[in-house]
Image: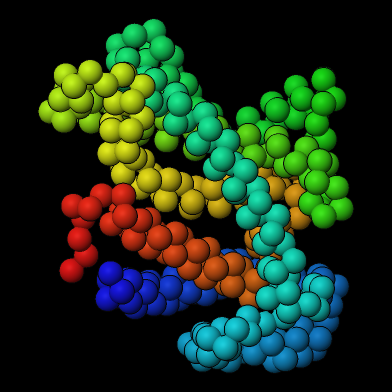
Amino acid sequence: MQKYVIRRVLATIPVLLLISLFTFFAIRLLPGDPARAILGPEADMVAVEALRDDLGWNKNVVVQYVDWLADAVTGDFGTSHRSGDSVVSLIGSRIALTVELGIMALIIGLVVAIPLGILAGSRPNTPFDYFSTFFAVLGAAIPNFWLAMMLILVFSVKLQWLPALGFTAFLDDPIQNLRSLLLPAIAIGVFQAAVIARQTRAAMVEVLRQDYVRTAYAKGLSERTVILRHAFRNALIPVVTVMGLQVSRIVGGAIIIETVFSLPGLGKLIIDSILFRELVTVQAMALLIAASVAAINLVVDVAYGYMDPRIRYE
């Protein structure tokens, strides 16, 4: 197992390098001059060129990438041109919100999807199964930003139960913190629930056809015991795969949803950095997201060995 983990970590390094390379050069293909965007349209050329020299943007683009990569390896991702803060401090001040939002969205998705998938899979071709399929298709088809606006319209504008905008830190007011993140988490979590419910249903249908399930019924075990202790445990393996894949979708959803709800998280930081041509921040965020997704996928792969003894890593 240790050798497998080491191999996976080493295999992730070239992936991160390729992502950083793609992001670095893709950003520089965007129209406009970043120095002009920072100083404003009225700045004279002398000031613009001075800023470009100061930031190293007049160097060869390959040299720029090598310099940035060398600094990134040491944890130095540069400094924000707008705020003057280091990129690491900017990310550190916002990452807690995005992580909390992602966890809430995943919890909402699991709480809805797992029972729905189990019941639909154990009772195929019934009205409840058709309802589960309808929910899965609808939940996967609805754009999260449209759902977010509908949630704001109903629960914030009409009913005035939950805040539409803003954020309260958990340490300042735990209840208000959860209230401010509930609607964004639902907007992200509905898609997760739809995908996971569909996968859970398919896995349960497949597992319930196996011989050992019929044997368990023949021994006189109750339906509840067979489904929860025997069938669901084996059906959980492909479900965990889908859960791992949803991490990248949660990050993508957070980018849009945080902007809709004006939440000061990593998603809004990415949008603001792109709009204001904060190249160093965008590059650091792309690398962070790629590393996070790779780490989650590694955790999922390692978890297979504990959930299914038949799986071995050579």
Question: Which one is nearer the viewer's eye here, 163 or 157?
Answer: 163
Asked if one can make out residue 284 in the rendered structure from this viewpoint, the answer is: yes
Q: Residue at x 82, y 20 (%)?
A: 159
Q: Residue at x 64, y 90 (%)?
A: 56
Q: Residue at x 43, y 45 (%)?
A: 243
Question: Which one is nearer the viewer's eye here, 271 or 209?
Answer: 209
Position of residue 188 measured from the top left corner of the image (x, y, whole percent)? 59, 39
Q: Is 52 situated left or right of 244 in this image?
A: right
Asked if one can make out residue 18 in the rendered structure from this viewpoint, the answer is: no
Q: Is 124 situated left or right of 111 in this image?
A: left
| In the depicted structure, whether residue 193 falls above or below residue 40 | above
Q: How many marks?
A: 0
Viewport quadrant of the C terminus: bottom left
* Furthest-front residue in this view: 220
Q: Residue at x 71, y 47 (%)?
A: 259
Position of residue 87 measured from the top left corner of the image (x, y, whole percent)? 69, 75
Position of residue 236 measured from the top left corner of the image (x, y, whole percent)? 34, 40
Q: Is 90 situated left or right of 43 in this image?
A: left
* Furthest-left residue in this view: 211
Q: Is 222 situated left or right of 272 in this image?
A: left
Position of residue 211 measured from the top left corner of the image (x, y, whole percent)? 12, 28
| In the depicted structure, whether residue 86 falls above or below residue 107 | below
**In which image quadrant can residue 90 be found?**
bottom right
Viewport quadrant of the N terminus: bottom left
| In the depicted structure, whether residue 70 falls above or below residue 295 | below
* Furthest-top residue in this view: 127
